[in-house]
Amino acid sequence: VPSGELATARYFASIRNQPSQLLVFLREMPKGGDLHNHLSGAIYAESYLQWSANDGLCLVTDTMSLVAPPCTDTAGGRPPASIVFSDSVAYSQAIDAMSMRNWNPALNGHDHFFATFGKFGPASGKTGDMLAEVAARAAAEHVSYLELMLTPAGTATSQLGRDIIWDPKAPTFAAARDGLLAAGFRAAVRAEAKQRLDEAEGRQRDLLHCGASQAGAGCRVTVRYISQVARASGPPQVFAQILAGFEVASQDPRFVGLNLVQPEDDPAAIRDFSLQMSMLAFLQPLYPAVRVTLHAGELTDGLVPPESLRFHIRASVEQGHAVRIGHGVDVMHENGALELLQEMAAKHVLVEIALTSNDSILGVRGTRHPLHAYLKAGVPV
C-alpha cells in the first residue's frame, strides 16, 4: 500500500468520531460522479427567490408558491416575490416551503418533498443559471462529474404527443412510434433539445467565465444529461417522452440516457408501471446504444399496498433494460429478493443509494436500509 494512502487511512481512522473534522476531510476528498441529480431540485430556494424577484414573479402567500404575474399587493395574497427581501419572516417561510429546511421529521416528509417542486416550478426555467450553480458547487466539493436530469424537448414532445392514436385497451407501440416519426417528431425534438442546451451551456460558460484567465472552477466539471420522463402523465404522453429521450440521446452525446421521474407511488405511476416497462422493452432495442437508469423501489411498506413492493426493481432490470436503479429501497420486499440481488450483481446493475433522501422522504434508515444487503450480495452501489 502506498505510504500516502496508508497515512490517509490512519488519519481517517483517527477522526471517525469527530464530525467537525470529518466534514473538512470529506469536503476536500476528491470525488467521482454525482449520478442521481434532479437539476431543478438541486437549486437552493434562495436562488429561486432571487431569480423570481429579478424576473417579476409573484408569491402566493397562502401556499408560499411562485407564480407568473400579474401580482397584487400583500393584502391580496399575491404580492411580488421581491417582498421576501424586505420581510424576513416571509423569506424564511418561503425557503422552508420550497425545501426540506427545518422540516419536522415526525411529519410527512414524502408529501412535503414532492410538493416543493410545484412551489418553485415557475422559477426553474433558467437552465443556464442552474447549470452554473450546480457546477460551481460540485467543483467546491471536489466532484468531477455530474449527470443532471432535465426535460430536453418538452414543447415539441407535448405538441406532437397529443396526436398519438392510442387505444388504451390494446396500445400498439410500433404504430405510435411510426406515427410520431412520420409527423416530424425526430427532427423536432432533436432540434429543440440542441437549441435549448446550447443556449443553457452558453449562459453557464458566461456566468462561470469559462475560457477567461479567471475561469470558475465549475468550468472543469464534466456535465452530462439524463432525459427525464414524467411517469405520472397519461400513457400517450409517457410514450412520447420516452421516445424523445431515446431520440435525443442517440444523436446528442451530451445526453447519456433517460429516466422516469415523479413519485413512484403516484396513482397513475402505480397503475401504469407495467405498461411503462413494456414501452421501454419495445423501444430500448431500437436504440441499443442509449442507456436507461430507472427510479425503482423508492417505496416502503405502508406507503403502497404490498403488491406494489414485489416487482418494480425486477421489472425495471428485466423489462426496462435498466443498467442503474435509483434508490432500490424496497428490494427485500421483492419476490425472490435474494435471487434478484444475485442477478443484479451478475449483470453489474448499479444502485444509486441516497441515504438522506430515503430517511427524510420514506423514513427508512439505519439497519432497515438495504445498503448492507446490496453490499453483501456484491451489487455495485
Image: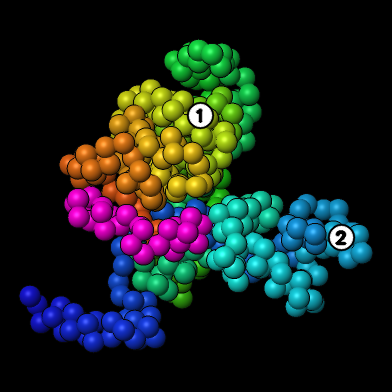
Main secondary structure type of the part rendered in magenta: helix
Query: As displayed, is residue 90 above or below residue 262?
Result: below
Which of the 4 image quadrants contains residue 143?
A: bottom left
Quick one: 144 or 6, which is closer to the camera?
6
Query: Which colouring convention does the figure follow?
Result: rainbow
- What label sits on residue 272 in the rendered view? 1
The mark closer to the camera, 1 or 2, is 1
At label 1, the amino acid type is Asp
Quick one: 326 or 24, which is closer to the camera?
326
Disc 2 is placed on an element classified as loop
Q: Is residue 269 left or right of residue 159?
A: left
Residue 124, image x, y percentages: 63, 54
Which segment is the magenta one? Answer: 356-381
What residue do we see at 70% from left, 66% from top? Answer: 94
Exactly how many numbered labels are in the figure? 2
Quick check: is 358 in the magenta stretch? Answer: yes
Q: Is residue 201 left or right of residue 85?
A: left
Residue 173, image x, y percentages: 46, 18
Quick one: 233 or 201, which is closer to the camera?
233
Residue 284, image x, y percentages: 36, 28
Query: As displayed, is residue 24 above or below residue 82?
Result: below
At label 2, the amino acid type is Gly
Of labels 1 and 2, earlier in sequence is 2
- What label sits on residue 242 in the rendered view? none
What residue do we see at 51% from left, 67% from top? Answer: 208
Residue carrying label 2:
77
- Verify CB contact (< 8 Å) between mark 1 and mark 2: no
Quick check: is 136 in the magenta stretch? Answer: no
Q: Residues within 10 Å of mark 2 (few under 14, many from 20)?
A: some
